[in-house]
Amino acid sequence: MNNKNHKKTNLLVILGPTAVGKSAIAVELALKYNGEVISADSRQVYRGLNIGTGKITQEEMKGVPHHLLDIADPDERLTALDWKKKAEIVIADITSRGKLPIICGGTGFYISSLIDDLGFPEVPADTEEQKKLELKSAEELFDELKKLDPERAKTIDMKNKRRLSRAITIARALGTVPKLTSTKDTDDGQYNVLQIGIILPDPELRSRIHARLVQRVEITNENGVDMLQEAQLLHAPSPAGMNLSFERMTELGLEYRYLAEYLQMKINKKELILILSTKIWQYARRQKAWWKKDTRIKWHAPDDMVGIENELNSFLK
């Protein structure tokens, strides 16, 4: 039963497409408003997936505590429900210490599962049905999903056979895959939420995506490793490596799918950059499509800190 006198936890969410500059904004706000950051990125939860996922560095954190990074090995499978449960525990801890929890990331389903308290389908994963589906091509799976649930097909990675197979299994069992309830009245929820969306014009965002990708491929990080070397270390069957299979790298999607192809010499470095630049841009468009109908999000340019802080000041009154 809802207790109208119950004081709900304030929760700030910084979201937006990849490469738009969310992490830097979250850090700046955390420093000014006594906050701590909780990552909402479905691949940054994995240890070793650093350069390819754009994981924030210790230097970039500027001393601000960050949570739910590096909480699983990359050969494990951490679900949205797993993340939601962990996020709720971390939020409670941050709040108990008088600080502001700040969710920051681009995985829309993670964020929605938390703030809208989405139910999760009671459909087992990795069933025999799902394994049989994974024997089909990605194109066949995507065509089937479009027939079963065209809305989910608009946002899913159409090359990820595991996610496609899982979505089809759920759609067959339930009729549809659970969708974003973007207009839900959250008065009964446990959080008082402000969602700040960070956005750029498409040409500028696409240019940023390409420039960032080239930098990650061509320039080493503070540990003297570039994105190609990181992929080699992930795959290497040695004490220094993580012995991650090419199959699992492909499942992880985007950068790691095509890095696996590069390591197998199916594509060269130039082709890798060209393909990934297009694929990451397509991913950014899917991210924007996920949030498009959510009228609760307050959208700002990354350099509009005055506008963002005005939103937050009003929210915290």
Image (cartoon, grey):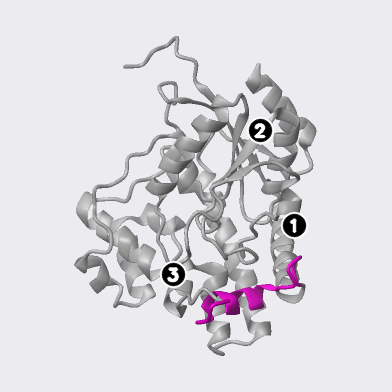
Q: Is residue 198 above or below residue 50?
A: above
Q: Residue at x 49, y 68 (%)?
A: 253
Which quarter of the rendered picture does the C terminus lie within?
top right
Which of pointers 3 and 1 lies earlier in the amino acid sequence? 1
The crowding category of the residue bearing disc 1, from other C-alpha atoms within 10 Å (few below 14, some 14 to 19, many at least 20), is few
Q: Nearer the viewer, residue 1 or 294?
A: 1
Please name the residue that numbered disc 3 is placed on.
251
Residue 239: within the magenta? yes
* Between marks 2 and 3 in the image, the one whose residue lies nearer the viewer: 2
Residue 182 seen: no
Q: Secondary structure at mark 1?
A: helix
The crowding category of the residue bearing disc 3, from other C-alpha atoms within 10 Å (few below 14, some 14 to 19, many at least 20), is some
The crowding category of the residue bearing disc 2, from other C-alpha atoms within 10 Å (few below 14, some 14 to 19, many at least 20), is many
Q: Secondary structure at mark 3?
A: helix
* Between marks 1 and 2 in the image, the one whose residue lies nearer the viewer: 2
Q: Nearer the viewer, residue 46 or 187?
A: 46
Expressed as whole percent of the image width and height from the top left, the position of residue 159 reads 44, 71
Q: Nearer the viewer, residue 251 or 240?
A: 240
Decide if residue 117 is on the left or right side of residue 165.
right
Measured in 3D between alpha carbons, the distance from the residue under mark 3 to the one under mark 1, in whole angstroms, is 29 Å
Residue 213: within the magenta? no
Which quarter of the rendered picture does the N terminus lie within?
top left
Please name the residue that numbered disc 2 is placed on.
35
Q: Which residues are magenta?
A: 220-240
Decide if residue 41 is on the left or right side of residue 176.
right
Which disc number belongs to residue 204?
A: 1
